[in-house]
Image (cartoon, helix red, strand yellow):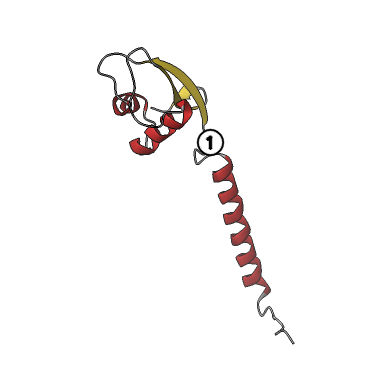
Amino acid sequence: MPRQIRIKSKTRFCIFLTTVIALFISLIAAVWNGGKAASDMDWVEVEIVEGDTLWRIAERTLPPHTDIREYIRQIREANGLKSCNIRVGQKLFIPIYVRNGNPLN
């Protein structure tokens, strides 16, 4: 026969349940928003010129508190690039994060 669970303190149980629900909602919101809470993403098209690299392009448009390697991964994924090799004249879409219509960088 399974052991019966007995709640000794209703107050502690309510606090525990509220905390678990709040954490679950926060996790869902972060995943739903792609980890960029309270911001929207816009796109800008960049034409590659001599001397451009993904790293340099990322440095110019990098949002605050963002790992540049993760940002370059996003650029590659958005443009279907399998490597970091780019060519002069190539056009890339770069994600620009905005809040209230203003770029974050």
- At x 44% / y 33%, what residue is drawn? 74
From the viewer's perspective, is 3 left or right of 49? Answer: right
- The residue tagged with tag 1: helix, strand or loop? loop
In this rendering, the answer to whether 23 lies above or below 43 is below
Residue at x 65%, y 77% (from the top left corner): 9
Q: Quadrant of residue 20?
A: bottom right
Q: Locate residue 18, reporting x and y percent.
A: 63, 61
40 left or right, relative to 82: right
Image x and y of residue 77, in percent: 46, 32
Which residue in the structure is indicated by mark 1? 38
Q: Nearer the viewer, residue 57 or 33?
A: 57
Q: Quadrant of the N terminus?
A: bottom right
Q: What is the total number of numbered labels drawn onto the structure image? A: 1
Kind of residue at badge 1: Ala
Outermost residue, bottom side: 1
Left or right, 45 with respect to 86, comes to right
Query: Farthest residue toward the left?
Result: 51
